Amino acid sequence: MTVMVKHPLVSVVDDDESVRESLPDLLRELGYSARAFSSAAEFLASDCVAETRCLILDIAMPGMTGPDLQQELTVRGQEIPIVFITAQADETVRPRSLEQGAVECLFKPFSDVALFEALNAVFRVS
Amino acid sequence: MNADRQIRREIADCGRSSEQRIGLLPQRLREPRNNAAAEDRTATWMGIGIAEIGAMVGGQIRQGHPLPVVLATLCQLFDATVKGYSSSILLLDRTGARVRNAAGPGMPASYMKQFEGSQVRWNEIAPGLRLHEVSPILSLTGEPLGIFAVYQRESNSDLPRCHAALMAQFTHVASAVIERMRSDEALKRSAELLERTQQFSSTCCFSWRVGTDEISSTKELRQLFELDADDVPVTFELIGARMHPEDISSFHKMIERAKSGVNDFEYEHRLRLPENSVKYLRVVAHRTRHQEGPLEYIGAVQDVTHRRHAEEALAKSRDELARAARVTSLGVLTAAIAHEVNQPLAGIVTNASTCRRMLAVDPPDVEGARETARRTIRDAERASEIVRRLRALFCKKGATSESLDLNEATREVVALSLSELERNKMIVRTELAAELPSVHGDRVQLQQVILNLLLNASDAMSSVDDRPRQLMVRTERDEKDCVRLSVRDTGVGFDPQAVDRLFDAFYTTKSSGMGIGLSVSRSIIESHRGRLWATRNDGPGVTFSFSIPCGPQDVTTGVNSARSANAEERHPRSL
């Protein structure tokens, strides 16, 4: 896939296949470049880390979790704006995520509008 | 010898009544019979009669003098009677080996002192005294109680020998005195033991003569019933006035049953006391009928208020715990289901959103839209697959089928729920048919149905106060090789128009409860190829019955749905 400068790269990290399949298409429709990774390790091992302008990150994943990856990136000095997504309808998750530096936290299933607004917030910030 | 027996009886009986032997009533003193003295003149020796000796020591016993004092009096009487002689009585302990008390008022104190606590020995004689005669004091059964010894003062050594008959008579009186006083002591100890046991176990004893309704009791019984007057006899009328209004009818029934001559009865009731406090009492009684005597119950009343309160607190916290556990597990379960289902839902929403956007552009990306629509359908199928799997998960333990005895299964459930039912004042009766053929099915499921019917019946009667809350569980053979179990209550019944909806899920007439108990019960019974139905009684209340075929057959798979609904009903009270 060719990544153009005017389409900032949004990387999706989620162990759920239907999210990995569907979300990049929607992101592209919204005007972003998109890549999907099935685990945090896969993302870290890829050549996309430096290029990624926004990370859409699942919280609960086997192995390294979303927050683990967030911490790892901080340690590496590669701070990428993060939008957490989660299937766990736990009201305490969102404030905790925001407190720890995430731009947004979306509960699955989320609408395209909610995603659009979260991305707007990310790119306004950056 | 007649005189001896008479004196023994006189000493043994003086001051005692039969009530005192049981240790229940305060001592009722009786005047000694004096006619014995007149008859016993034949035993007179040097001016004093054996009956008079008995009367004198008997008087001391009645006045409560201790044994050494009474024995010393006996020695003094001997010494006064037989000039020139001194006597002593050495009292042996129960082993017969050691001297426990020594009485010898006419003997030098230093001489008597040597005996205290020692083994019996005679080698040290006081100066100026000579051991003249020794006679063992034996009980009626021949056990050694003591020793009666007579000494002669050396200055009087020319006196004739002491009369053997007199020795024998004094020895005999001493024996009677010792036996009487030892039995008094044992009686006193037993009474003390009884009193202390009553105190620390909050129990008191009573006896009830059925014919005359005469109730004998200790003062503790008055305290237990908080009866003020000490002099008025305890009567059922007085007790009835203290009885909690809800327990009065069963209290009278208990009396009726006892009067009809049951062997034992055991009963628990409440008292309503002046400050409006409630006391729980447990009564146990045993019938005794002495030969030719009147019918009498001897029993105990125990204050079990503290235990009851503790049990109630325990039941309450158990209920709360069960409720909390159910809510918690329900929350955990909901979260797990939500997580599983939200994943494909996220895919569906995202794909559908993308699809719409692809179709909205000009020109529309039809190929892309078709692909996202395909994925939407696939994710929806995935979601429904997850729901199906979740249901399968809860039904993992499919119904088991085993040969089982419905009577036994019923007995277990009744035994488990009996305390709860009785606490709610239900009168539970079971009529289980003998030789009921066994049925095939899932024991736990059938027991859940029975428990559900029992608790429903109990709930239906919880507001009934104008008639007995009777719960009858019956098993019997039904037609077509079936067995039937029915639970009959005297509760509030149900609206005839509601009969069709009774077994619908979420239909409930109760403020608490989800209304799935009967629905689940019916599913379970139907999976056993049986049926569950309700009929209104001729009198008040309802009878719920189920009938299932006997003989081997498997529980159908349909029971799984029942089981999954039941998985959340761990706490049967709110079914």
Image (cartoon, coloured by chain):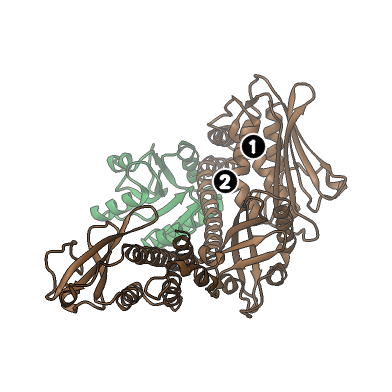
> Which of pointers 2 and 1 lies earlier in the amino acid sequence?
1
The colour with which the image depicts chain B is: brown
- Give the label, 2 or 1, closer to the camera: 1
Name the residue type under label 2.
Arg
Above or below — where is B67 with respect to B442? Answer: below
- Residue indicated by mark 1: B410
Foreground: B88 or B520?
Answer: B88
Answer left or right for B267 relative to B200. Answer: right
Q: Nearer the viewer, residue B12 or B164?
A: B164
Left or right: residue B203 compared with residue B427: left
User: Which chain identifier belongs to the green chain?
Assistant: A
Indicate the amino acid at tag 1: Thr
Question: Are discs 2 and 1 located on one and the same chain?
Answer: yes
Chain at tag 2: B
User: Dot 2 corresponds to which residue?
Assistant: B570
Point out residue B76 in the picture as x, y percentages from the top left corner: 31, 77
Cα distance, mark 2 to mark 1?
19 Å
| Residue B372 visible at all | no
Residue B512 visible (yes or no): yes
Q: At 81% across and 49% down in the image, what residue appears?
A: B541
Query: From the viewer's perspective, is residue B1 above or below residue B274?
Result: above
Q: Is residue B136 left or right of residue A121?
A: left
Q: Secondary structure at mark 1?
A: helix
